Every structure is written in C-alpha cells, then in structure tokens.
Image: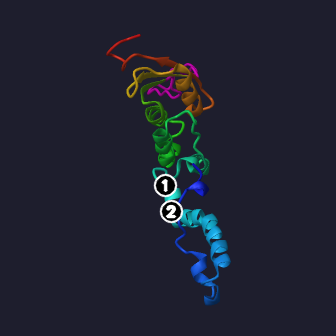
C-alpha cells in the first residue's frame, strides 16, 4: 500500500486555519486548502515517522528493500517479510562475519532456518621438524552440510544460492542437504 493513498488521513497542520482571517469564512479558499491538506497529509505523516523508516523492524514493507540497498544486503523478494527484516537488521553483524565459517552458518540459519556444518580443506600446516615435507596444496573446496531446523525440508537450489553469495571467491562450494544434524542420521 502506498503511503499517499491512506483514506481519511488528516493533516496535523491544516492550511485553512493558517490563512488570514478574511479567508476563514471563504468557502472556496477553505475547500481549496482542504484539497492541499489531503495531498500534504502523507508527507507530514512520513516526516513525523521518519526515524522509524531507518529501523528494519519498523520500516514500511515497501521501504525495506530500499533500506537493504543502503546497508548493502542482498534480499530475495521470495523470502518472508520477517526474514528480510531480520537480515537487514543484522546487516552489520553479517558483514563483519562475511567469508568466515561463522558468517556462512549464521546466514543459512537466518535466511533459510537451516543448521550448517562447514568442512574446509584448510590451507595452513606447520611442523616442528625443519626437514619435514611440504604439506599438500589445499583442495580449494568448501563442503557445506545443511539440515532443516525451522522447516521440514530445504530446497537445495536456495541453499546453494545463499552459500555461493557467502562463499569466499577462491573456493568452490559444494552443498549436501541432510535430513538432520550430522551424527543423528547419515544420508
């Protein structure tokens, strides 16, 4: 719903009452300014509530996508509104952990209601022996095992889209959808 189309919205500052006294009884002037009041009422309502527009939990639904652009968060219009609000509200935290195991797990939990286990090939090794052989090159693959927590099942394409958006660019990502947490049931 557009904020301009709110039926019965009254202006907190009617123009007719601000006119000089000689127009107070003029029917044409009062009707004309009442028409302007109808046009200006949504503007006043928006300005009076402006701080709420910048809080993800209070912003109007049609403003939420614009707010997501401000905080550089990609949201999918197919996501439920409460999920989009949560993602926009936690944008700073999600950006802080982007590209990390924790960041990927949090994003999957928040967006899809999925638990996740990230298996990384690693890229660091050490030895106390100076003549030790060099470690093998890292695999360059990231395995993400996910299982549903909030819904009965997960869509693998949605999971893959979220993982690809959060996966570091130098790694290839592979997804495994499990029926439950690892160790309870193996698929």
Residue 82 vertical placement versus 138 (above, below):
below
Residue 155 locus on image (x, y percent):
51, 21
Q: Which residue is mark 2?
A: 51
Q: Quadrant of residue 3?
A: bottom right
Q: How many marks?
A: 2
Q: Main secondary structure of the magenta part?
A: loop
Q: Quadrant of residue 106?
A: top left
Q: Nearer the viewer, residue 137 or 176?
A: 176
Q: Nearer the viewer, residue 174 or 111?
A: 111
The residue shown at (58%, 27%) is 161
Residue 95 vertical placement versus 172 (above, below):
below
Q: Is residue 53 visible?
A: yes
Q: Which residue is mark 1?
A: 55
Q: Nearer the viewer, residue 16 or 180?
A: 16
Q: Is residue 142 left or right of residue 146?
A: right
Residue 27 locus on image (x, y percent):
64, 78
CB within 8 Å, label 1 to label 2:
yes
Residue 177 locus on image (x, y percent):
46, 18
Q: Magenta residues, as a range?
A: 120-141
């Amino acid at each position: 719903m557009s904020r301009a189309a709110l039926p019965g919205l009254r202006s907190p500052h009617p123009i007719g009452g601000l006119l000089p006294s000689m127009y107070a009884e003029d029917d044409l002037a009062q009707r004309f300014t009442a028409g302007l009041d109808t046009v200006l009422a949504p503007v006043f309502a928006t300005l009076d509530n402006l701080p709420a527009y910048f809080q993800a939990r209070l912003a109007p639904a049609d403003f939420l996508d614009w707010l997501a652009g401000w905080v550089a968060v990609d949201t999918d219009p197919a996501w439920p509104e409460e999920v989009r609000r949560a993602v926009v509200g936690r944008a700073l935290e999600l950006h802080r952990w982007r590209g990390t195991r924790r960041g990927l797990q949090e994003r999957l939990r928040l967006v899809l209601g999925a638990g996740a286990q990230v298996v990384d090939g690693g890229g660091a090794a050490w030895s106390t022996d100076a003549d030790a052989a060099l470690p093998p090159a890292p695999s360059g693959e990231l395995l993400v095992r996910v299982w549903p927590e909030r819904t009965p099942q997960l869509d693998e394409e949605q999971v893959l889209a979220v993982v690809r958006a959060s996966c570091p660019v130098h790694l290839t990502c592979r997804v495994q959808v499990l029926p439950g947490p690892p160790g309870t049931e193996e698929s």
